[in-house]
Amino acid sequence: MARCAFCDADFEAGPGDLLLVCPYCGTAQTVKGAKFKDHYMIRVHFDQSEAQTTLLDWVSKQLGAPEDLAARARFVKSELVFYPFWVSRVDAHSRYKGFGRDARFYDEWPQRPGAYKRIDFFLKPESGEFTRRYEIVLPAVKDIDEDVANFPIPTRAKEYFSHAHAEEFDGKVLHSQVSEEQAREFARKRAFDLQTALIMDEVVQVDSRHDDIDVGETHLIHVPVWELTYRYGNSKYRASVSAATGYVIEAKYPRSVTFRAAAILSGLVLLGVGGGLLGLAFGVFGTTLFPAGGVVSGGMLSLLGLVLLYKGVSRKEAKEQL
């Protein structure tokens, strides 16, 4: 339990919560009672009914979904959760010196212009600099679905946190389990790693580098997500829908028996044909045919067969494509 330093109300807080949001007055505060001012939210634009309708409309259009899914599905749980995220603006400037990889080409094939008989690779000195501005996002709770954690946040639509708005939809506002200092340190390391990736695209060996990384405005933002559970037949399926944009972040849905049977049969056929081509390419049957083409074609057909088998036997987790 914790006590609000501003309205004196008692409310629940876990041992790992570091920045608390009072469910009565909406004030963000540290565990020591210091007020945190840079607290924002994304407003809800899709209510419970609209989120449910959007989800059923989307899943009913997915490959293999039963034709009566939208009509027979029944929602058993609908909860609006405001997930906390730390967002940091980082300005990074990096200068580097090192060696990049280059090549010399010799003896061009007369029959194939642009193709050479011999290529010598060597290292040559390289130097340069990169200046970038990043917006680093860090989920502020540990127990969060990976798809929700990686879903793009429309930060330009942020506004100061409104307890009344969250309460209007009976939303559950989660406390942050990450402090501002931890978020800023994460942003600094993440920006450093992104700058490193840019440098390593240019060189294979770094002799020296200098980084000027400035972590600027860092704020906490609560993002609303509808966590939905619906029943179809004897099974339950979960989904997450953005309450701000209406996008289906992730959803599990049933596949029809007809689709499963067709996918399994097609997968087995393709797997058999692909395996046969691979066998011919590697001489498994006593003779080697189509060594190059057999490997490529057989591998592709086998892979496609495995994908169809997976779709036929699994309850696929689908994601909205942005």
Image (spheres, rainbow, N blue to C red):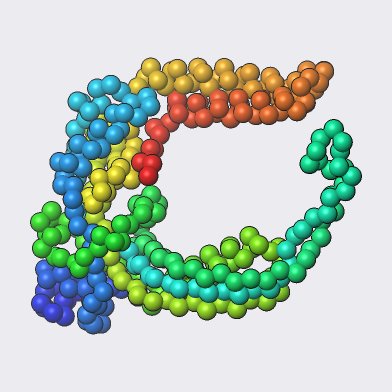
The quarter of the displayed image where residue 269 is located: top right
Q: Residue at x 11, y 68 (%)?
A: 24
Q: Nearer the viewer, residue 230 or 226?
A: 226
On the picture, is 60 further left or further right than 194?
left
Q: Image quadrant for the N terminus?
A: bottom left
Q: Position of residue 87 (x, y in %)?
A: 35, 67
The quarter of the displayed image where residue 48 is located: top left
Q: Nearer the viewer, residue 230 or 191?
A: 191
In this rendering, is residue 229 above or below 66?
below
Can residue 121 be seen here? The reply is: yes
Q: Residue at x 81, y 21 (%)?
A: 288
Q: Residue at x 40, y 65 (%)?
A: 135
Total marks in image: 0
On the picture, is 167 further left or further right than 259?
left
Q: Residue at x 34, y 73 (%)?
A: 218
Q: Position of residue 76 (x, y in %)?
A: 19, 39
On the picture, is 80 further left or further right than 102?
left
Can residue 222 be seen here? The reply is: no
In this rendering, is residue 150 above or below 159?
above
Q: Position of residue 276 (x, y in %)?
A: 68, 19
Q: Image quadrant for the C terminus?
A: top left
In this rendering, is residue 300 above or below 320?
above
Q: Position of residue 177 (x, y in %)?
A: 33, 68
